[in-house]
Image (spheres, rainbow, N blue to C red):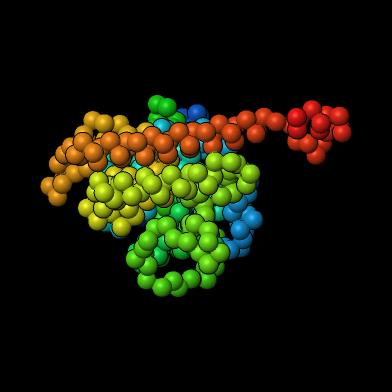
Amino acid sequence: MRKPLATLALLASLSCLAGPAAQAPAPDMAAVPASIRLAAQEIAAELAGLCPLAPAGDTAAYNACRQGLFGDSALRSHLPPVLIWGRQSKAPGATLRQTSLTQFAPDVWTSLYAPLFMFNGRHTVEWVPEEKLFLVRLETAFRNRLAPGQFPYPFWHDEAKWSMYENANGFMLWMAPDTGKIRAAQFTDRAPNAMLQSVQPVQHAKYEGPWLWTDEKGNTQPAVTLFDGIYRPDNPYIKAIDRQYRDLAVQMRESQCSSCHVPTNPDKISRLVLLSTPAHAAGEIDRLIKSVKEDRMPMDEFRLSYALSADNKKWLLESAEAFRTTVQAAQAWETQAARKPSTQTLSSNQRAQVTK
């Protein structure tokens, strides 16, 4: 039996309104638990407030972002003891488990990596069954025109990595459904949103190291890896951190640690740990000491751990523990300094009391 023409016309009009069958549906925010949704909103708003869009070479904006995220930030409160971070895999459908990422202590990531990005607050949240995690997607742009010493290491040692950093338009936070903690974070140049601002590419010469260098003024670079912009300039332990890290680096070279824990990742470790700068080593120093004491590092060409000689083990542990002691002293000094009232807002009598 034929349908009336009016019925066919109605069905045709409804079909047009429905749009293409292949069009992806909007994220179902109603399916996201309130705690996850609110956490994502809080983090997105904070990132947009502390790290808004600015010229890609604006050092003042970058430092303000670093200082804001390094403190008691909403982002920091949602980080686990160890965060994995890196670019989105180019392999179609690659899971986090199949993607090579780097492990970071929370303070290292919030002071060196997250502040390199800028945000506008727009975000989505979705459940990803393959990962059993919620994915928070934030629109972003990258500060590609900062001075070389403002990057934790020269990302341009790898052209593909630098290209994705420069053209990043998405920032991905993977949140655990039970705790709301961010298990992993990634960046990508393949997010569905448009670029937030035009990118003026920076062409760097091919870089092959070293990961620490001394500039024409005699300063260690990258400056950010010596806590520049995070610690106060008058922190009395900054120079000692630099000196003791160099002692530690010598011992790590002698013990074959430096052949693996560097940005080039020569052994293609799926969960890389970096020890190539003072800040990176400070974030991993407890695990380094524990691994050496338990003879779990270094490893041979077959990825089997072996014990160092008695002398090498002794010297490495001594330099690592000295470095850790100085880092802890610097952190304690910063905590104490933050508690002291500013002398600029005190009366002369109060200033005299503070400076005694």
> Can residue 106 be seen?
yes
Q: Is residue 34 above or below residue 125?
A: above
Residue placed at 14% from the left, 50% from the top? 301
Name which quarter of the figure residue 198 lies in: bottom right
> Can residue 119 be seen?
no
On screen, residue 78 versus residue 50, left or right, reads: left
Q: Position of residue 163 (x, y in %)?
A: 40, 65
Total numbered badges shown on the rendered structure: 0
Furthest residue to the left? 302
Seen from the viewer's position, the closer of residues 185 and 133 is 185
Seen from the viewer's position, the closer of residues 269 and 274 is 274
Furthest residue to the front? 311
Quadrant location of the C terminus?
A: top right
Q: Position of residue 332 (x, y in %)?
A: 55, 31
On screen, residue 283 versus residue 227, left or right, reads: left
Residue placed at 47% from the left, 61% from the top? 214
Seen from the viewer's position, the closer of residues 133 and 292 is 292
Residue placed at 53% from the left, 47% from the top? 239
Residue placed at 61% from the left, 60% from the top? 58
Q: Position of residue 213 (x, y in %)?
A: 44, 60
